[in-house]
């Protein structure tokens, strides 16, 4: 029952979208499932094309993959349907009847909330407001919307069946460990738990369903919105280092800091990671740009990754060396992390 879960280890935007797209293209999973909601934006560059995704799982790049939206997730119908139509994936998209639905009223409620928008720096996508309604048991679910009728499926039952038949399922979590409602830097967090355990729970799966748990770190730390960021660098320094980034959903500049071993260690432990993915290595070591094998990496880059493995107590299985999915080093095979189907 090979379930491979990919989660973020810092404050989101670690590059989970790229890692999941790479894994989907190379491992050809039977299904890819997404958790979370439209506050999370992934950028995927595959075969030279750039995709900005807010709802459709990044693993859509494998044409054979069924695309699942978790029942604990939330969808914004306009965002989901327009994205799925533009990508031509409506026929393989499956939404659980129990998935929550975000409405324009939720978006307006958040955007009018100064505490959320100015204090916390929310993305203002209505996710927190819809979560409030869900907790108060007045949120309408996917099963209440006729326009979703053809997409509805008992996603939990279908995933049970796939896993029990030994088919590979790739799960794409969103945000990162330190944005968790419970474990992050409260109140500067998102409105859900962002751990591996929570992603499984959103799908209706159990801890023992996970075969591989990959925690993704960027080669430096970024954060959008308010809250502590140890070692934060001024924006000018980020520009100078080539680390400046802008949010996929809001376009806001991302705050940046050097890689943080303490934050990373706790994320690895709390997620019970089997392995680690490190993205944007090319931003620390320009000679690593688009390297596709460990041997192509400069010596200092290899030494830095080995230090991470040693200090974090988990192997580095995947390394991102550029935006395109082709710019990836994959050591899954040599680490015994290729799925047996
Ligand atoms: P959330 O679900 O919002 O947490 O997002 P995410 O983890 O999918 O990350 P996002 O796509 O928002 O941000 C990562 C950025 O880094 C994107 O612009 C990617 O194109 C880029 N990126 C990912 N991997 C690499 C890499 O190895 N090298 C370079 N240069 N860019 C990368
Ligand atoms: P909200 O979840 O949109 O209310 O935002 C709460 C906090 O989490 C803000 O600091 C956001 O910037 C941050 N956040 C939410 N989703 C993401 C994400 O996908 N990537 C990075 N930060 C996020
Ligand atoms: Mg993002």
Image (tube, rainbow, N blue to C red):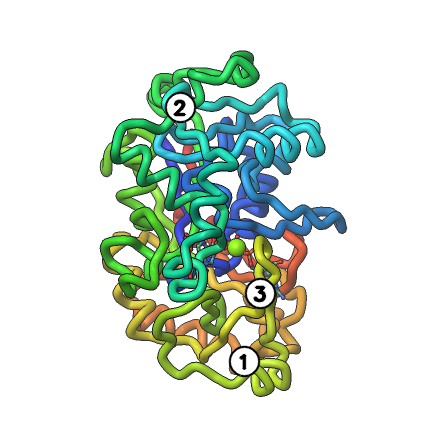
Locate the N terminus and report the quarter of the image it occupies.
top left
Residue drawn at x 60%, y 26% is 64
Q: Nearer the viewer, mark 1 or mark 2?
A: 2
Q: Looking at the rendering, which quadrant does residue 208 occupy? A: top left
The crowd level at tag 1 (other Cα within 10 Å; few <14, some 14-19, many 20+) is few
Q: Nearer the viewer, residue 314 or 257?
A: 257
Q: Looking at the rendering, which quadrant does residue 240 occupy? A: bottom right
Left-right relation of 27 to 153: right
Q: Which residue is mark 1?
A: 299
The crowd level at tag 2 (other Cα within 10 Å; few <14, some 14-19, many 20+) is some
Find out if the beta carbon at label 2 lies less than 8 Å from the nearest ligand 2 atom: no
State the SS at label 3. Answer: loop
First of labels 1, 3 by sequence position: 3
State the SS at label 2. Answer: loop
Q: Is residue 306 visible from the viewing direction of this image?
A: yes
Q: Which residue is mark 3?
A: 252
Q: Nearer the viewer, residue 95 or 127?
A: 127
Left-right relation of 135 to 17: left
Q: Nearer the viewer, residue 305 or 86?
A: 86
Residue sticking out furthest to the right: 48
Cα distance between the residues tagged 3 and 2: 31 Å
Disc 1 to disc 3: CB gap under 8 Å: no
Q: Position of residue 10 (x, y in %)?
A: 39, 64
Find out if the beta carbon at label 3 lies less than 8 Å from the nearest ligand 2 atom: yes
Q: What is the number of the mark on residue 141?
A: 2
């Amino acid at each position: 029952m090979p379930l491979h879960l990919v989660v973020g280890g810092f404050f989101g935007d670690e590059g989970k979208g790229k890692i999941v797209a790479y894994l989907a293209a190379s491992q050809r999973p039977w299904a890819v499932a997404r958790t979370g909601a439209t506050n999370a934006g992934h950028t995927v560059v595959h075969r030279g094309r750039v995709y900005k995704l807010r709802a459709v799982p990044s693993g859509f790049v494998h044409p054979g993959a069924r695309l699942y939206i978790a029942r604990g997730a939330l969808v914004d119908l306009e965002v989901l349907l327009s994205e799925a139509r533009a990508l031509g994936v409506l026929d393989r998209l499956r939404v659980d009847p129990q998935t929550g639905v975000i409405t324009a009223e939720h978006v307006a409620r958040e955007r009018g909330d100064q505490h959320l928008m100015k204090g916390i720096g929310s993305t203002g996508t209505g996710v927190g407001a819809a979560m409030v309604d869900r907790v108060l048991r007045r949120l309408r679910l996917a099963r209440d919307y006729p326009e979703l009728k053809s997409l509805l499926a008992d996603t939990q039952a279908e995933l049970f069946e796939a896993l029990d038949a030994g088919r590979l399922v790739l799960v794409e979590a969103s945000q990162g460990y330190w944005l968790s409602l419970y474990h992050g830097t409260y109140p500067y967090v998102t409105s859900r738990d962002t751990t591996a355990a929570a992603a499984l729970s959103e799908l209706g799966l159990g801890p023992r369903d996970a075969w591989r748990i990959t925690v993704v770190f960027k080669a430096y730390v970024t954060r959008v919105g308010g809250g502590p960021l140890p070692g934060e660098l001024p924006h000018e320094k980020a520009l100078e280092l080539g680390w400046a980034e802008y949010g996929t959903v809001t376009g806001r500049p991302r705050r940046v800091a050097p890689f943080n071993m303490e934050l990373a260690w706790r994320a690895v432990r709390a997620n019970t990671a089997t392995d680690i993915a490190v993205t944007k290595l090319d931003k620390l070591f320009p000679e690593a740009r688009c390297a596709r094998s460990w041997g192509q990496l400069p010596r200092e880059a290899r030494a830095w990754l080995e230090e991470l493995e040693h200090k974090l107590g988990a192997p580095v299985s995947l390394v991102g060396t550029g935006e395109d999915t082709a710019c990836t080093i994959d050591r899954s095979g040599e680490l015994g992390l290729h799925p047996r189907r």
